[in-house]
Image (cartoon, rainbow, N blue to C red):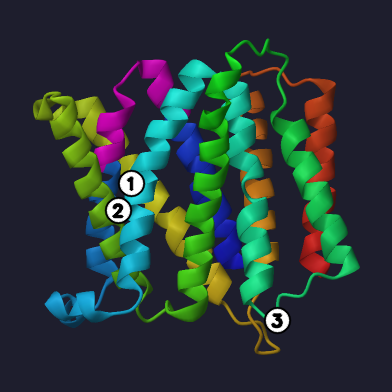
Amino acid sequence: MIYLILSILSSTLIYIIFKYIDKFKISTFDIIIINYITASVLGILLSDFNQINFSVFKNAWVPYSAIIGILFIMMFVIIARSSQVVGIAVTTVSNKMSVIIPIMVSILIDPLDVLTNLKAFGIFLALIAVFLTIYRERKVDFHPRDIYLPIILFLGMGLVDSLVKYAQHYYVDDSILALFTVVLFVMAAIAGLLTKLIRRTSFTDLIKPNTFLFGIALGVSNYGSLYFLIRALNHQTNAGNTFDGSIVFGVNNLGVIALSVLFGLIVFKEKLLKINWIGIIISFIAIYILSIT
């Protein structure tokens, strides 16, 4: 359970950092690139240096790692575009509700991840909690043709987490986890740099003090989020079983949302609606139900 808690804390820190990035009006995309470079370096430092050679590319997990890394950048672009066109509220809901996809994938590919009545009820409560906790009273005003953006985001984020679960289940144990993250974050960094090159924006912006420092902080948090999530999925209980992926993804998602909202309330003095408080309460109930199934 400690790895799941560390993953939740790392993921929550990502949202906190983004809050400060928005406050200081810094180029988010440049920070994202530094973030992936930082995460790549962390992966290398945690890896067995004897494993880092060209023979790595012969491993069956490499295509999954590379695809996830590229999807990271693509989803960031979609999130930015969706936030501008259909609004932050719809974008956030699409992003967070996508957790249902890796939950279902985990149940499908893992014979030990059984959908019991209690677990199904916990997942149902989790989805309700996600929606209620992040709900905001905002006017939804966008052209119907732009609905494809939140749909792509929903499917894309669901695909990213599903690929993480698939790779972890079949290929990635703790002995190669660090190496897996190296390929993933290097691909994300390369994709980001190529995107910046296509956009023809200045590369000197990457070394601006605020951009560099926030990028490093985000990279450490981002790395911890993925690393500890996979460690949680790999972790064996005293009975010799691993935690169900459906539970890990559900609890992780709920924990991040609840902590992020509470942090926003305490530190940034954000106001919560009654419906948000109801969502937070339901989220803790759902976490408890999922943790005992």
Question: Which secondary structure lies at badge 1?
Answer: helix
The spot of residue 64 in percent (x, y) is 37, 66
In the rendered view of the protein, which quadrant contains the N terminus? bottom right
Specify the principal SS of the magenta part: helix
Q: For this rendering, which residue is in front, 166 or 281?
A: 166
Say whether residue 177 is magenta.
no
Query: Mark 2: which secondary structure?
Result: helix
Q: Amino acid at mark 1?
A: Gly
Who comes first in sequence, dot 1 or dot 3? 3
Q: Answer few, some or many: residues within 10 Å of disc 1's Cα (few below 14, many 20 plus, some between 14 and 19).
A: many
- Above or below, 187 against 180 in this view is above
Q: Whole-percent x and y of residue 239?
A: 71, 89
**Tag 3: amino acid:** Leu
Residue type at the position of mark 2: Ala
* Callout 2–callout 1 Cβ contact below 8 Å: yes
Outermost residue toward the bottom? 240
Taking depth in this image into account, of 290 and 161 the one nearest to the observer is 161
Seen at 70% across and 64% down, the residue is: 247
Cα distance between the residues tagged 1 and 3? 33 Å
Q: Is residue 91 left or right of residue 70?
A: right
Callout 3: helix, strand or loop?
Answer: loop
Q: Farthest residue in the right direction?
A: 117
In front: label 1 or label 3:
3
Residue 219 - label? 1
Residue 46 vs residue 284: left or right?
Answer: left
As measured in the structure, the alpha-carbon distance from the residue carrying label 2 to the one carrying label 1 is: 5 Å
Say whether residue 268 is visible. Answer: no
Cα–Cα gap, marks 3 and 2: 32 Å
Q: On residue 197, which mark appears?
A: none
- Look at mark 3 in the image and give the residue it sits on: 112
Return the x and y of residue 11 as percentages of the image width and height.
51, 47
